[in-house]
Image (cartoon, rainbow, N blue to C red):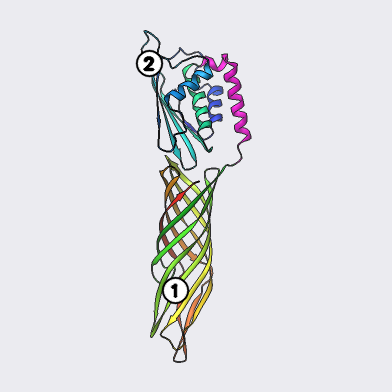
Amino acid sequence: MIRGRTKLPAAAVWALASAGALPAHAERLSPALVVTRAPGVEDCPDANGVAARVRAMTQGDPLAARPGVARDTWLQVEFSQTLSGYRAVITARGRRQGTRSIDDVGPGCASLADAVTLTLVMLLDPELVHASSALSDAVHADATASARDRTPSVSFAAEASGGVTLGILEHGGGLIEAGARLAFARSLALALGGGYLFPDRTSAPPGSVTLDLWYGYARISGAVFEHAGTRLALFVGPSVGSLGGSSEDFDYRTDRRLLWVAGGFGVEAFALLAGSFSWSARLCAVTPFRYEGFYVNDAGERHRAFRTPGIGGALSLGVSVAP
């Protein structure tokens, strides 16, 4: 029986060989193989490609039908794409049953295809684990390569979003953002970018003050859930910008810009759309580190027209693309 999941394909295969997940002296299976590929993973092998890899590794054809022997095991391999790489789910039915999920963060499907081949070979004919020096050398070499490559991989994506705010300026309004995201070791990411809050107006009889905000942000996020191309993460980070105010219908018209510094935290979600495109949703709470205000003069008297609220929020939807 095969069970479990791993994020290091070579280490998973080596664990199967060394931990005895497959019996060392099992009768040869008579399997049938089905391979499916989700959109965006066309570089992964199809059923013929997987079978050819198995034949090359075993110097035989354990997947071939044997005359007079009915199929007793059905194997299905599903290749798909995640936010950070590729995934294969191997399912066995019949005499051998179980499921194994293998993830790979490489830029292509070659490493994952090798891991799937090794797993299938050991499932189909466990004697090869001990009798085939070529297979043993391949497992050792792959495990050694994985040990060398355990440094965090980095992926890049550009993103843009739009949404609404409440309580950041005087009232609610619209916002747009654009930036870049660097993902480290699957679970951590750093986002850098900037945004603009569309003008808002606060009443200050007998006139008004028009407000706007330009800002830059840095956000560090950590994934709390990931499955089938969907990722949920918590984030935190600072924002620094320029808060503008322009008064109208007062004795003196004034235009000023003030330093705006705030912290933000919240939750964000990503899900694959097609190929390298993903959609995103973000809910963020914003609290200023500096409380700034705008004052106006009317009939010789000075009045405060606006002061940054203690806490506000933003909800945005967007898209991201990985080159």
Q: Is residue 142 above or below residue 299?
A: above
Q: Residues within 10 Å of mark 1 (few under 14, many from 20)?
A: many
Task: Name the residue beneath numbered marker 1.
Answer: 211
Residue type marked 2: Asp
What residue is rendered at 44% in x and 74% in y? 211
Q: Nearer the viewer, residue 250 or 305?
A: 250
* Callout 2 touching callout 1 (CB < 8 Å): no
Q: Is residue 134 magenta?
A: yes
Image coordinates of residue 191 in percent, x first then y, are: 52, 54
What residue is rendered at 51% in x and 17% in y? 126
| Magenta-colored span | 126-151
Q: Is residue 157 above or below residue 7?
A: below
The secondary structure that dominates the magenta segment is helix
Q: Quadrant of residue 64?
A: top left
How much space separates mark 2 and mark 1, taking CA atoms?
Answer: 72 Å
Q: Is residue 66 above or below residue 245?
A: above
What residue is rendered at 48% in x and 79% in y? 294
Identify the mark at residue 72; answer none if there is no mark: 2
Which one is earlier in the sequence, the residue at label 2 or at label 1?
2
Image coordinates of residue 265 in percent, x first then y, are: 48, 58
Image coordinates of residue 28 in percent, x first then y, are: 45, 13
Q: Residues within 10 Å of mark 2 (few under 14, many from 20)?
A: few
